[in-house]
Image (cartoon, rainbow, N blue to C red):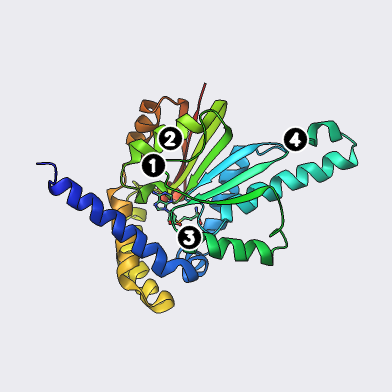
Amino acid sequence: TSFGFKEVREEEKSRMVGNVFSNVASNYDLMNDVMSAGLHRLWKDRLVSKLNPFPGMKHLDVAGGTGDVAFRILDSVNSIRRRAMQDVLEDDIQEETKIYVCDINPNMLNVGKKRALERGIGEDKSLLWVEGDAEALSFGDNTMDGYTIAFGIRNVTHIEKVLSEAYRVLKHGGRFLCLELSHVDIPVFKEFYDFYSFSVIPALGELVAGDRKSYQYLVESIRRFPPQEKFASMIADAGFQQVEYENLVGGVVAIHSGLKV
Ligand code: SAM
């Protein structure tokens, strides 16, 4: 039948993810710090240093939420630009940088815009906020130098669609980078991590955000996400080359990357 079990589950999943991020938007940044003990900041730094941003680049940060990754990219571009200005290498910096933050949830984007204002980059023309679905992007083919998705792909309905959209919008020579909670495979550390995620995280969710269920759901979604090797092969199946990944904190998170040749 066309209205089978799979469709019902997918619809429910989309709705659930929508609810989760509407409920958590205002507490989102605080919860990230609490749950990861501030480590998510270092992981995002690492993601952006692997990206190697440059002035003039066109970049798409998908599931960009409240702007954490985009702010880092912009900081990196601006510091290169300042250095270039000192060296009077201004020819290189004529072209305009565009960093698009794309997210399906307007609440998250609104928190992001507010944060940009607070950081004094609310008027920066390089930063653009776009409401949109990772599975059906509104950007043209071969338009982006870089694509990042941080803690976003785990919650989408069709990972394959997200990957093929990433491939489509990237220019030849463009890089795909994905930061995601992944799988720990180290004895003892794994037991500790399981305890932390199944017991501590939902309790923290309740305590800090008054929302145990959303955080329980997030933990379960980590377990359902494909392990590092499997996810790498999905990236390759989407057409990317030089696919590799780096585990951080024993696989608590992994950064996968691929190149559109
Ligand atoms: N990248 C940000 C960060 O690292 O702080 C936000 C990550 S947050 C855990 C996940 C984000 O994915 C949410 O803002 C949610 O709205 C967004 N999201 C979920 N499904 C999406 C989809 N299909 N397309 C675009 N964004 C999506």
Q: Residue at x 60, y 61 (%)?
A: 113
Respond yes or no on whether mark 1 lies under 8 Å from ligand 1: yes
Q: Which one is nearer the viewer's eye here, 227 or 237?
A: 237
Residue 174 lies left or right of residue 94; in this view the side is left
Residue 111 seen anywhere in this rendered image of the structure: yes
- In the rendered view of the protein, which quadrant contains the N terminus? top left
Q: Which residue is mark 2?
A: 165
Q: Quadrant of residue 87?
A: top right
Q: Which mark is residue 95?
A: 4
Could you give the CA–CA distance between mark 1 and mark 4, rounded to whole angstroms? 29 Å
Q: Earlier in the sequence, mark 2 or mark 1?
A: 1
Up the image or down, 11 lies above or below 89; here it is below
Residue 221 lies left or right of residue 147; in this view the side is left
Could you give the CA–CA distance between mark 2 and mark 1, rounded to whole angstroms? 6 Å
What amino acid type is highlighted by mark number 3? Pro
Q: Which one is nearer the viewer's eye here, 196 or 40?
A: 40
Q: Which residue is mark 1?
A: 135
Could you give the CA–CA distance between mark 4 and mark 2, rounded to whole angstroms? 25 Å
Q: Which residue is mark 3?
A: 106
Image x and y of residue 40, in percent: 52, 57
Q: Circle 4 sits in a helix, a strand or a loop, which is it?
A: loop
Image x and y of residue 11, in percent: 24, 53
Q: Which one is nearer the viewer's eye here, 12 or 83?
A: 12
Q: Earlier in the sequence, mark 4 or mark 2?
A: 4
Respond yes or no on whether mark 4 lies under 8 Å from ligand 1: no
Q: Circle 2 sits in a helix, a strand or a loop, which is it?
A: helix
Q: Earlier in the sequence, mark 4 or mark 3?
A: 4
User: Dot 1 surroundings within 10 Å: few (below 14), some, or many (20 or more)?
Assistant: some
Residue 233 lies left or right of residue 25; in this view the side is left
For the residues labelled 4 and 2, say whether their Cβ atoms are less than 8 Å apart.
no
User: Dot 3 surroundings within 10 Å: few (below 14), some, or many (20 or more)?
Assistant: some
Q: Residue at x 82, y 45 (%)?
A: 82
